[in-house]
Image (spheres, rainbow, N blue to C red):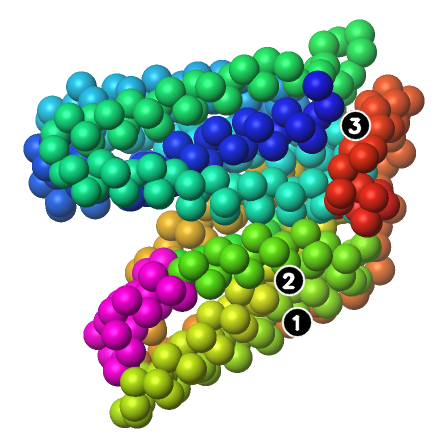
Amino acid sequence: MPLKRVLIWATAATSTAKGVMFSVSVLFFTTVAGISPATVGVGLTIAGAVGVVTAFASGRLCDRFGPRRVLIVAATAQGGALAAYCLTRDAGTFVLVACVAVGAESVERTAHVALLARAFTGPARVGVRAWLRVVDNVSIAAGSGLAAVALVVGSRSAYLAAVLAAAVLTLVALVPLRALPVLVGGGGDRLAEGGPSPLGDRRYLTATALHAVVSVQALLLTVGMPLWVTGHTAAPDVTVAVLLLLNTGLVSILQVWSTRLVGDVPSAGRAVFHGTVLLLAACLCYAAAGYPSGTGFAVALLVAAVVAHSLGEIVSEAGGWELAFEWADPANSGAYQGVSQAGVGIGLAVAPVVVTSAAVGLGPPGWLLLGSMFLAAGAGTRALSARRRVPQLALSAEERSARADGEDNLAGHPAGLAYGADH
């Protein structure tokens, strides 16, 4: 089975499970497992911190044992943890299981990216990653639809069935994952050891920190926008659902297209900057929607905000992916991608506090502050990418052969046909 098809099927299964859990998890923990809301919040915060650590550490594991093996172990652990939620009845067990579930999910994300870094080269990596993100978004929406059945029924059995379905879907992903090809001959799917550490690469660490700032934008849509719309604008509450659907549709349609904007480091830096300009425009529209106005005008401003937000999101993401791949040393790609994913994890971990404190707490000036923060990070990324590039180490014959095989696997894939050898 071609590599791209394996990753698409595995992503579809795990992301559908993720959509189910997004919709029912909090209600399941509080009504079925009997965990207090405060304990759920603390437990998930601890689990998020564990996820940042495992995202970083799993990069080293991918270099040592190969991303294929790490993916299989992570999917197994995550599926088992989701099933274990059904047996959780006390706070201590909940925190432990949540740490395993979130930690395994972080390991899985890092291993996915490390696999792309090894299997493809040039634009193909960003192209395939864009396709996987589209599959991720669509599958999460499908999982949310499945979870709606449990929410409508509202019984203990319905919630248990939903969580068990998520566990089964996660384990189903093992079927295509086990079909992943061994990418490097001789030594299994390991990479050669001895590459430089990303912790000593100041350029990569700086780019990761800047991308972590930009990644805060993800919580604008799921945390900031709903609170802002329902509490500070004249728009009806149902507007929140419409705006979320609009974002999902735009990302699904345009994410692959956005990879045409990046083909090298300078173009990636420009893409990140242009994306943050759009994020600033989105924040200004969000802020304007909070001033006294008619319902129609507020809704129009919010629609404009989400369109700008969605475009800024996909363009800045494409640029960030390209830089994370291009600036990673090929002899130690797993460790580099582990640092990149840990940076994103940190950004997402602090995002709820940043978004609620600024956008909701300060009102329009807070939205302006957030937009300026994104723009500053984008400008810093563009300046960093404009510096003279340091040549990467030459790939070994085995690595060149492995990446050539990965590109062959892309033959016939729409991203490969449209964008050549991107990602």
Residue under pointer 3: 409
Which mark is first along the chain, 3 or 2?
2
Find the distance from the CA under tag 2 to the CA under tag 1: 7 Å
| Residue type pointed to by label 1 | His
Circle 3 sits in a helix, a strand or a loop, which is it? helix
Give the image quarter of residue 299: bottom left
- In the picture, the quarter occupied by the C terminus is top right
Q: Left of 155 or right of it: where is 161?
A: right
- Say whether residue 323 is visible: no
The stretch of residues the image draws in magenta is 220-243
Give the image quarter of residue 198: top right
Q: How many numbered marks does the figure carry?
A: 3
* Residue 386 rendering spot, x and y as whole percentages: 79, 65
Which mark is first along the chain, 1 or 3?
1
Tag shown at residue 315: 2
Circle 2 sits in a helix, a strand or a loop, which is it? helix
* Residue 60 rendering spot, x and y as whole percentages: 59, 26
Q: Residue at point 42% right, 52% down? A: 348
Residue under pointer 1: 274
Q: Residue at point 35% right, 43% down? A: 144
Relative to 164, say whether 246 is above or below.
below
In the rendered image, residue 223 lying in the magenta stretch gets the answer yes
| Residue type pointed to by label 3 | Asn
- In the picture, the quarter occupied by the N terminus is top right
